[in-house]
Image (cartoon, helix red, strand yellow):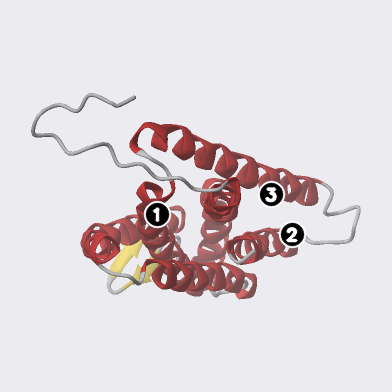
Amino acid sequence: MHEEIIAGAPPARRVTASKKVINGWAMYDWANSAFSTTVIAVFLGPYLASLAADAAAAAGSTTLNILGWAVQPESVFVYATSLSVVLQVFFLPILGAIADYSHLRKRMLQFFATIGAVATMALWFVQGDLWWLGTILYVIANLTFGASIVFYNSFLPDIASNDQQDRVSSYGWAMGYLGGGLLLLLNLILYQFRDAIGLSGTTAVRINLASAGVWWFGFSFL
C-alpha cells in the first residue's frame, strides 16, 4: 500500500510521540495559564489600582507623577500591559527565529518560564506604596510569559504530525483552561472566605497572586 504524493510536493511529515510526551507538553499550558487567569484577568489590575490610588492620595493628589506624566491610578495596569506587549512585539520575532534555528529551545523555555514564575511569586511583596514594584514585576512576568509560549509552541511540529497538530494543540488549550480555571476557582474561594480564616483582603490577594507563580513554576518542571 502506498500514498499518492502530489508531484513536486514534499511528503507529509510524520511524527510519532508517546502520550507521555504529549501530556508533558500540554502540562506547560496547564502551568502558565494560572498567570493569565489569576493575575491578568482577575486580581492584579484592581489591586495595583488600589495601591496606586492610596499612594497618590498620600501625596495629596488624585494622580501619579510618572516621569513627569500625570497618570490615573486605574490606568497603571493598562499602561503596564501595553508596555509589555510593545516589548513582546520587539523581542518575540527574534525569539521565534531562535526557536526555529537553534537547539536551545528547551533551555530557553525553562529560562523564561523560571523568570516569569519567580516574578509572579514576587508579587507577594507588593503592598503599601510598592505599586511601582508590582508594575515592574508584572511587565517582566508578562514579557517572559509571551516568550515562553514561543518556545512552547515550537515543539508542536516535533510531537505531532501535520494531520494531528490541531488535535494536539486543542488538547494543550484544554489543559490550559482546566489548569488556569482550577487555580482561579481555588483563589476565588480563598478570597471569598478570607474573613472566616483570618486574612485581610490585601493578604488574600497577595497569596493569590503568588500562588499563580508557584503553580506556574511547579507544574512547569514536573
Q: Are marks 2 and 3 in contact (CB under 8 Å)?
A: no
Q: Residue at x 49, y 74 (%)?
A: 133
Quarter of the picture containing the N terminus is top left
Would you place residue 82 above or below residue 14 in this image? below
Type of amino acid at the residue the image marks with label 2: Ala
Q: Which of marks 1 and 2 is nearer the N terminus?
A: 1
**Residue at point 52%, 52% (across, down):** 25
Q: Residue 155 carries which label?
A: 1
Cα distance, mark 1 to mark 2? 37 Å
**In the image, residue 123 lies at what x, y percent?**
59, 69
Q: Would you place residue 68 above or below residue 79 in this image?
A: below
Using residue 69 as the reference point, say whether residue 163 is left or right of it.
right
What is the spatial separation of the Cα atoms under label 3 and label 1, in whole angstroms? 25 Å
Q: Which element is circle 3 on?
A: helix
Residue 188 position in % (x across, y down): 73, 46
| Residue 78 horizontal/vertical position (percent) | 39, 53
Amino acid of disc 1 = Phe
Which residue is labeled 3 in the image? 183
Estimate the x, y position of residue 206 in percent, counting from the top left. Answer: 67, 64
Q: What residue type is labelled 3?
A: Leu
Task: Give whichever of discs 2 and 3 has the lower sequence position.
Answer: 3
- State the residue lying farthest toward the left: 8
Question: Is residue 112 positioned above or below 185 on the image?
Answer: below
Q: Name the residue under label 2.
A: 204
Q: Is mark 1 on a helix, strand or loop?
A: loop
Local packing at callout 3 (Cα closer than 10 Å; few below 14, some 14-19, many 20+) is many
**Residue drawn 58% across the image and 62% down it:** 220
